[in-house]
């Protein structure tokens, strides 16, 4: 015990500082909904300012601390609040890039100001004297640090309970809009939270200062340990976060006693990240998953006209081929740049195409380089085989990393990858099998062919260029392939992709592994260009620069990758100063902060330039088609009624495009009846759906109506698998699918639309509709994600065309859906359902947002579809005229219970239904009595 | 609960909405809506789902910026103000769902409703008016029953003492007996002289307590006037389909299933 105690004491002191920083982080994350990756940079800045004033200027320590903590902390807090406000509804990648960019800026500024060569230490300003406590020596500074951190955290807890501001901060977490309605500004409340959180980070930086010699990198990473503490607190609980900080501190301190070298020698330093990672992997889901964020709708990316792209590509290729003639001694840099563009392509595939985040791509490069060296030098494998294998080594690593993304959400993937990059450095870089204990450098041999000189600098350059061009070609093809559509769909709406039959977890893991493998290959190629590599080239913070670059560079695939690699590698190569790398890190970071602060419309080329380019270079017929007026065929409501009546007598059925059912093969489709038996769903204390049984047969429209909050959408979500029932069964075509995933149900023929439409906004109408056919093809099968079977291509094309014609959206086939009116968007969603061989469609309030004419047209199309295709429809709808018009059978829900089932004619006369809608108390009671019978 | 809510007698309309146009993105939901809530009166805002009732309340309370028109509270133009500024000007919205902070205690919920400039955080008037809350003062709001939560939401409004209270489906998802209690509480608020704009799915009950009714359909006002002049036939027609009589025959003919095509 007496041997352990000193370690525990040290651990408690550092742990208290972790806890302090972690608590500040959780405070800002919860109130503002933006995770601050720059939290640790705030701490680093405060530590350096304190050092300057206290050590260099000779101020008394307390006045230096006041400036570093009480002045600088709130100031940075205000900057962060401004940043957080402007990115609150931005897509995740941009959100992460903005605070990561700030971290890069601050870190670069510190390096430029203080350098990282001089040894700078801060004396133990809180008192280096010791006292004996429980039989061990304890420094006064440790006692003061611990006491201060406990006091601040406790004070914060009291503030949260007792003061109006504290209560308002908790309220803003619960419901910012309601707080606004109650007369308190959420913005001001958040500003206070940022000020306090940032001040706590600054305080933790100052408390850290005496523990180790100051180093910008170390300081930034030390406080990243606060992430681990925050993870233990579920990114929610302040008290648990503080306790988590103490736990990490003590465990890390004890680890230094037991694991100082050997294979686990890196454990003490990497422990916070190990904890972070373990929490993300193993803690129960409900503990971590927060409210879904609202994200503004994606805008379609403007792509330069094809002739311009081809011309620019050819021009660039000519320049690249000529490089050896002018590069001279910088040829190796050019080779590295070309190899790095492969890494950026892999990162772009992940970030820009599929909307996921990785903050450890440099780690994959390191894995690739190290593995390649082992395979060639140690094992003696042929060069090309070793290259392929080094890519494969990264695949399982990528798969494990992607787990948080599957279980939780994208932000946790960002955290996990960030932690993993640092973990990799501490734990493995110094190991024998990676870079070796001395870190002397790894040999990376060039390939050799007797008939082609590819082992000298020039020959190898051409080899890498060839491989890079091949990668570009492959990825451009991929962009236009099934996988490309699926990935872009994944970025826009995972829910829609899942309900269209794609097991999105397979897609997510697959793209992450693919990206990791490609990054490892790129890393190996770059390493071979340099002949020897050391771990210095693979610092985890470099991953952040990579990520920020891929988010901010303009241009589509593959231009962003080429540009990013060019600026990252060639600018330092062609400039002289010592600080070029740091300055460019500063510039990239600053740019990403600037991009985040810009309004969304200013984040791409100015429209004037785009229009000129389009007018000059885009062939006439490819310009955006004119959007027809929706419902133009109906002059007014009266006429539309006429059409509907005509339709009811079968007059319009013949005009529908016919698509033979079962034309699309390869999907296991049974007869389409959907049956719900004894369904019950409870949320907490509330019973949303109570013992509901209903049947929606194929070949007819069944209505499901009821007042707001009656449980209609909940019933739908249970049917399609997005929600688990408390009890009851969902039977599709005679088979119990209650335990199946949404994708599996979709593959069995259950399609659905959403009240709040789930479309792939950046895709065109045609691509959206095509996913309805391709989704079930891709399913959970990896190979099918990549390649279609022979004949599928034609099947997809014809089914897509037929569905678009059926729903009258063929004339806008090449328009991105984000540009369409609500009426058109509803039709596209329906067409996507119809394109696949779904036998039963769940349509959730399809007429909401449509005007009268559009609603009538929708009803008309629905009848046509049912008549032509023989599909069944279960329709949730509030427009009673539409329900009465198209349904053969109607179920009425009220308070989660079925109160009526019968043909629409009886519905109108039913007193129970009147009661449900108009709320007559007397009839209400009668209904209740009837329901219990 | 008799005096706290009214304060000084008001000379002007508690709420006046003129030519209000609002929507989401490119979708227009409200088309030139005019609406008046005279001081001390209850107005029932009726209409089928999707008519724009919630949008109207959101626009009046400031959660949604209108693209045209003006909103006057006590004769004061608040159109360009933020929600919290409007709350201070006298607008109180009980939003759809539960208008409480679920992770805060009852007392904390009430304390946030007391305007900042009032001395202290005296929640006593609300407890006197809603005695059911007194025994639950330390309970976390989210753990109470739906009815109790709505009572709390109403008590918050009561404490704020606004010029006009906007109620969006406060009885939604509640058991019939609890709905009775909610309506009693609303009637109490009305008796105390508060001005209410009520959106309710229990149309008949809302009309019973209202002085005026306003019918909204697809974003336009189709009826506005005394509540007792709206007859049941008109209401049924509007709720169970815009032109029910005209299509009744069609609907009846539809019971025959549409033949399947081979």
Image (tube, grey):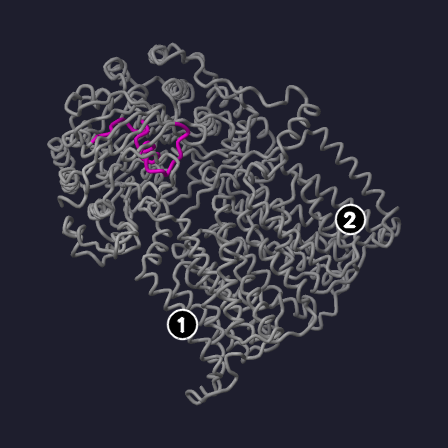
Quadrant in the picture for the N terminus of chain A: bottom left
Residue for badge 2: A464
Chain holding disc 2: A
Q: Nearer the viewer, residue A803 or A926?
A: A926
Image position of A597 (left or right of B210):
right
Q: Is residue B31 magenta?
A: no
Q: Please determine whether, in this image, residue A656 is positioned above or below residue A106.
A: above
- Residues marked 1 and 2 touching at CB (< 8 Å): no
| Observer able to see residue A862 | yes
> What secondary structure is marked by label 2?
helix
Rendered location of residue B157, percent (x, y): 24, 44
> What secondary structure is marked by label 1?
helix
Image position of A27 (left or right of A898):
right
Q: Please determine whether, in this image, residue A797 is positioned above or below residue A188.
A: above
Chain holding disc 1: A
Give the label on residue A392, or none: none
Rendered location of residue A839, percent (x, y): 41, 29
Rendered location of residue A611, percent (x, y): 64, 27
Q: Please determine whether, in this image, residue A507 is positioned above or below residue A117.
A: above
Give the label on residue A150, or none: 1
Q: Which residues are magenta?
A: B43-68
Q: Please determine whether, in this image, residue A382 is positioned above or below residue A467.
A: below
Neighbour tally class for label 1: few under 14, some 14-19, many 20 plus, Cα within 10 Å? some
Q: Is residue B53 magenta?
A: yes
């Amino acid at each position: 015990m007496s041997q352990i105690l000193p370690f525990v004491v040290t651990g408690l002191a550092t742990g208290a500082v972790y806890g302090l920083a972690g608590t500040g982080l959780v405070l800002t994350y919860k109130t503002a909904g933006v995770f601050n990756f720059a939290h640790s940079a705030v701490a680093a800045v405060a530590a350096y300012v304190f050092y300057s004033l206290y050590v260099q200027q000779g101020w008394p320590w307390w006045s230096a601390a006041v400036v570093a903590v009480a002045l600088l902390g709130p100031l940075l807090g205000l900057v962060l609040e401004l940043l957080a406000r402007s990115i609150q509804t931005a897509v995740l990648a941009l959100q992460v890039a903005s605070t990561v960019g700030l971290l890069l800026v601050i870190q670069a500024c510190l390096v430029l100001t203080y350098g990282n060569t001089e040894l700078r230490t801060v004396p133990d300003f809180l008192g280096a004297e010791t006292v004996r406590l429980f039989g061990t020596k304890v420094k006064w500074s440790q006692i003061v640090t611990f006491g201060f951190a406990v006091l601040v955290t406790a004070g914060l807890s009291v503030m949260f309970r007792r003061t109006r501001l504290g209560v308002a901060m908790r309220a803003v977490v619960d419901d910012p809009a309601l707080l606004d309605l109650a007369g308190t500004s959420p913005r001001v409340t958040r500003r206070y939270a940022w000020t306090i959180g940032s001040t706590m980070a600054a305080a933790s930086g100052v408390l850290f200062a005496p523990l180790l010699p100051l180093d910008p990198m170390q300081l930034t990473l030390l406080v990243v340990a606060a992430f681990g503490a925050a993870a233990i607190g579920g990114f929610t609980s302040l008290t648990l976060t503080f306790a988590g900080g103490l736990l990490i501190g003590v465990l890390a301190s004890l680890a230094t006693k037991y694991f100082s070298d050997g294979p686990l020698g890196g454990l003490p330093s990497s422990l916070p990240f190990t904890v972070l990672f373990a929490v993300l992997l193993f803690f129960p889901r409900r503990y971590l998953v927060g409210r879904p964020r609202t994200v503004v709708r994606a805008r379609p990316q403007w792509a330069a006209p094809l002739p311009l792209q081809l011309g620019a590509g050819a021009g660039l290729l000519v320049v690249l081929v000529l490089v050896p003639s002018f590069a001279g001694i910088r040829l190796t840099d050019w080779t590295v740049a070309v190899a790095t563009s492969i890494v950026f392509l892999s990162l772009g595939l992940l970030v820009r195409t599929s909307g996921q985040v990785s903050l450890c791509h440099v780690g994959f490069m390191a894995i690739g380089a190290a593995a390649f060296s082992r395979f060639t030098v140690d094992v003696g494998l042929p060069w090309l085989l070793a290259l392929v294998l080094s890519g494969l080594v990264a695949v399982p690593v990528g798969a494990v990393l992607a787990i948080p993304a599957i279980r939780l959400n994208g932000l946790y993937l960002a955290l996990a990858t960030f932690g993993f990059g640092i973990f990799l450095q501490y734990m493995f870089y110094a190991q024998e099998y990676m870079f070796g204990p001395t870190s002397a450098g790894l040999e990376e041999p060039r390939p050799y062919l007797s008939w082609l000189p590819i082992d000298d600098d020039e020959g190898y350059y051409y080899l890498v260029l060839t491989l890079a061009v091949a990668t570009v070609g492959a990825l451009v093809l991929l962009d236009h392939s099934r996988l490309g559509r699926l990935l872009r769909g994944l970025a826009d709406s995972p829910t829609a992709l899942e309900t269209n039959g794609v097991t999105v977890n397979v897609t997510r893991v697959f793209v992450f592994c693919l990206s990791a493998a490609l990054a490892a290959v790129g890393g190996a190629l770059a390493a071979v260009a340099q002949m020897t590599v050391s771990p210095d080239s693979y610092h985890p913070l470099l991953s952040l620069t990579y990520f920020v670059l891929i988010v901010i560079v303009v241009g589509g695939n593959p231009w962003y990758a080429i540009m990013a690699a060019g600026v990252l590698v060639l600018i330092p190569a062609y400039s002289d100063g010592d600080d070029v790398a740091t300055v460019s890190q500063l510039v990239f970071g600053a740019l990403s902060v600037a991009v985040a602060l810009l309004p969304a419309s200013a984040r791409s080329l100015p429209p004037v330039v785009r229009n000129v380019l389009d007018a000059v270079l885009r062939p006439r017929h490819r310009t955006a088609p004119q959007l027809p007026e929706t419902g133009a065929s109906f002059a007014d409501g009266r006429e539309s009624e006429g059409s509907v009546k005509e339709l009811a007598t079968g007059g319009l059925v013949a005009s529908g495009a016919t698509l033979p059912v079962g034309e699309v093969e390869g999907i296991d489709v049974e007869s389409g009846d959907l049956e719900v038996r004894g369904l019950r769903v409870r949320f907490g204390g509330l019973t949303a759906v109570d013992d509901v049984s209903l049947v929606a047969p194929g070949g007819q429209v069944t209505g499901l109506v009821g007042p707001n909050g009656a449980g209609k959408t909940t019933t739908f979500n249970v049917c399609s698998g997005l929600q688990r029932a408390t009890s009851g069964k969902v039977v599709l075509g005679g088979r119990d699918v209650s335990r199946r995933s949404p994708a599996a149900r979709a593959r069995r023929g259950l399609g659905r639309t959403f009240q709040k439409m789930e479309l792939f906004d950046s895709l065109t109408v045609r691509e959206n509709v095509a996913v309805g056919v391709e989704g079930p093809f891709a399913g959970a099968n990896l190979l099918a994600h990549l390649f279609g079977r022979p004949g599928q291509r034609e099947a997809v094309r014809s089914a897509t065309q037929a569905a678009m014609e059926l729903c009258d959206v063929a004339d806008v086939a090449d328009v991105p859906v984000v540009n369409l009116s609500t009426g058109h968007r509803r039709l596209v969603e329906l067409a996507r359902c119809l394109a696949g061989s779904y036998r039963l469609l769940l349509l959730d309030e399809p007429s909401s947002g449509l005007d009268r004419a559009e609603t009538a047209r929708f009803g008309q199309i629905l009848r046509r579809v049912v008549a032509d295709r023989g599909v069944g429809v279960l329709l949730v709808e509030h427009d009673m005229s539409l329900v009465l018009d198209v349904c053969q059978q109607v179920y009425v829900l009220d308070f989660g219970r079925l109160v009526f089932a019968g043909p629409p004619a009886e519905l109108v006369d039913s007193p129970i239904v009147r009661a449900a809608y108009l709320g007559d108390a007397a009839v209400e009671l009668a209904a209740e009595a009837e329901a219990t019978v | 609960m008799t005096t706290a809510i009214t304060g000084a007698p008001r000379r002007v309309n508690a709420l006046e909405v003129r030519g209000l146009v609002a929507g989401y993105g490119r979708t227009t939901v409200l088309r030139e809506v005019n609406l008046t809530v005279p001081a001390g009166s209850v107005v029932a805002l009726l209409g089928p789902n999707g008519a724009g009732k919630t949008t109207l309340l959101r626009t009046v309370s400031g959660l949604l910026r209108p693209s045209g028109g003006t909103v006057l509270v006590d004769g004061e133009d608040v159109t360009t103000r933020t929600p919290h500024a409007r709350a201070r000007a006298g607008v109180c919205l009980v939003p759809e769902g539960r208008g409480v902070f679920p992770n805060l205690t009852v007392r904390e919920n009430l304390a946030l409703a007391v305007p900042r400039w009032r001395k202290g955080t005296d929640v006593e008037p609300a407890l006197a008016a809603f005695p059911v809350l007194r025994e639950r003062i330390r309970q976390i709001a989210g753990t109470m029953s739906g009815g109790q939560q709505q009572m709390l939401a109403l008590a918050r409004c009561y404490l704020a003492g606004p010029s006009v209270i906007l109620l969006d489906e406060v009885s939604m998802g509640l058991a019939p007996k609890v709905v009775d209690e909610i309506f009693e509480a609303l009637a109490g608020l009305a008796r105390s002289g508060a001005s209410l704009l009520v959106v309710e799915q229990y149309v008949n009950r809302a009309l019973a307590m209202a002085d005026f009714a306003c019918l909204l359909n697809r974003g336009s006002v189709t009826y506005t006037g005394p509540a007792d002049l709206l007859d049941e036939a008109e209401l049924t027609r509007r709720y169970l389909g815009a032109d029910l009589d005209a299509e009744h025959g069609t609907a009846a003919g539809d019971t025959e299933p549409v033949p399947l095509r081979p």
